[in-house]
Image: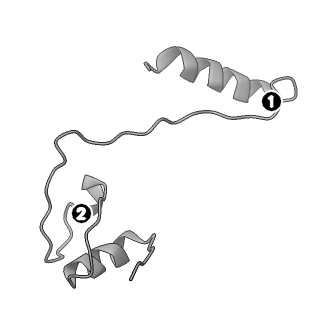
Amino acid sequence: MTSEVTDDYTIMAMVEEGLGVSMLYRRTVEGMRADIRVRPIVHAPSRDVVAAWRSWDTMPIATRRFIDYMSSHIVN
């Protein structure tokens, strides 16, 4: 049986009931009183976050400046 659940609290409840395992953000499980075991991942996964837009020419100037600022201050 396969289940796809997106709510963190439901995921933790299912794990607590022995219905599977999950990878969650550390902050999600910090302070929770669920009866589950938490193990850190040695080589933690990461994700790339990008900006996407349809047309630079029609984009508001504030948005252009924000993208320029973020592009010059975020290290790849």
**Which residue lies most toward the front here?**
1
| N-terminal-most mark, 2 or 1 | 2
Percent x, y of residue 58: 87, 29
**Which residue lies most toward the right here?**
58
Q: Secondary structure at mark 1?
A: loop
Q: Quadrant of residue 6?
A: bottom left
- Relative to 41, say whether 35 is above or below: below
Percent x, y of residue 69: 58, 19
Q: Foreground residue, 18 or 68?
A: 18
Crowding near the residue tagged with mark 1, few <14, some 14–19, many ≥20 C-alpha atoms within 10 Å: few
- Relative to 26, say whether 76 is above or below: above
| Label 2 sits on residue | 29
Disc 2 to disc 1, C-alpha distance: 39 Å
Looking at the image, residue 24 sits to the left or right of residue 58; the answer is left
Residue at the image position 80 percent from the left and 29 percent from the top: 60
Q: How is the image coloured?
A: one colour
The N terminus - image quarter? bottom left
Looking at the image, residue 54 sits to the left or right of residue 72; the answer is right
Q: Identify the disc placed on residue 60.
A: 1
The C terminus - image quarter? top left
Q: How many marks?
A: 2
Amino acid type, residue under disc 1 in the picture = Pro
